[in-house]
Image (tube, rainbow, N blue to C red):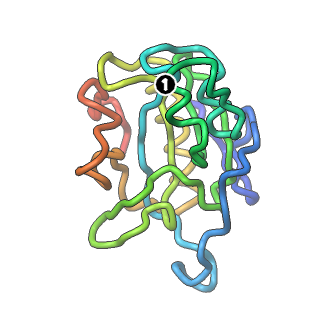
Amino acid sequence: MTIYHINQAGFAEDAQFIASPNFDDRSADNGIGGKPEISLIVIHNISLPPGQYGGNGIIELFTNQLDANEHPYYAQIHTYKVSTHFLIRRDGTLIQFVSCLNRAWHAGVSSWLGRERCNDFSIGIELEGSDFEAFEPAQYQTLNNLIAGIRKAYPIQSIVGHSDIAPDRKTDPGPHFDWQQVIK
């Protein structure tokens, strides 16, 4: 197993980096010794347009470049200011949008173990996929290698789905995500 090394700047070496403007500083008062706490990994799924894979829609969404006229669904979401730390494509390719040291905007209104605002203390990982079909073996391999690297860099206490932290509004990573394949 090849583990992704997360460097001191919060970037996974060997990941493709595409900068998202949608992030801010983590609160320094939510950790120990003035360092922000990073203790949660949140797994999501995303496809743009919905149910279609391989295009640039996800990248365009996270970089505020989504064209509202390109697809009817985009007209509903093109103004969203959202991001994630990582995206894992169907073929296992890893893309990073935000340093792990910064707060990506992936969780929205959320709560885990009584703590609100999960973006403050989590790392978001999007898998290119949907609630309606299985994920690819290459995605699980990259996910496990990434989780191992994140665990070496930060004191992760839980790995959850978006549906676990926002159950009234989110369903991802969905019923076809196989938690048995995730090395926790």
- Please state if 140 lies on the left or on the right of 54 as rendered: left
Q: Front-most of 9 and 184?
A: 9
* Residue 111 seen in the current view: yes
Q: Which residue is mark 1?
A: 73
Task: Mark yes or no: residue 84 visible.
Answer: no
Q: Residue at x 42, y 49 (%)?
A: 42
Look at the picture and state if 24 lies above or below 93: below
Q: Residue at x 36, y 46 (%)?
A: 162
The location of residue 66, given as percent across then percent down, is 66, 30
Q: Residue at x 63, y 18 (%)?
A: 70
Total labels drawn: 1
Please tell me in which quadrant of the rendered image residue 23 appears: bottom right
The image shows residue 180 at horizontal and vertical percentages of 27, 32
Q: Quadrant of residue 62?
A: top right
Residue 101: percent from left, percent from top: 66, 62
Residue 84, percent from left and from top? 57, 45
Quadrant where the N terminus is found in the figure: top right
Depth order, front residue of 164/48: 48
Residue at the (31%, 43%) spot, across then down: 170
11 displayed left or right of 47: right
* Residue nearest the viewer, comparing 130 with 156: 130
Q: Is residue 15 above or below residue 121?
A: above
> The residue tagged with tag 1: helix, strand or loop?
loop
Amino acid type, callout 1:
Tyr
- Which picture quadrant has residue 56? top right
In the rendered view of the protein, which quadrant contains the C terminus?
Answer: top left
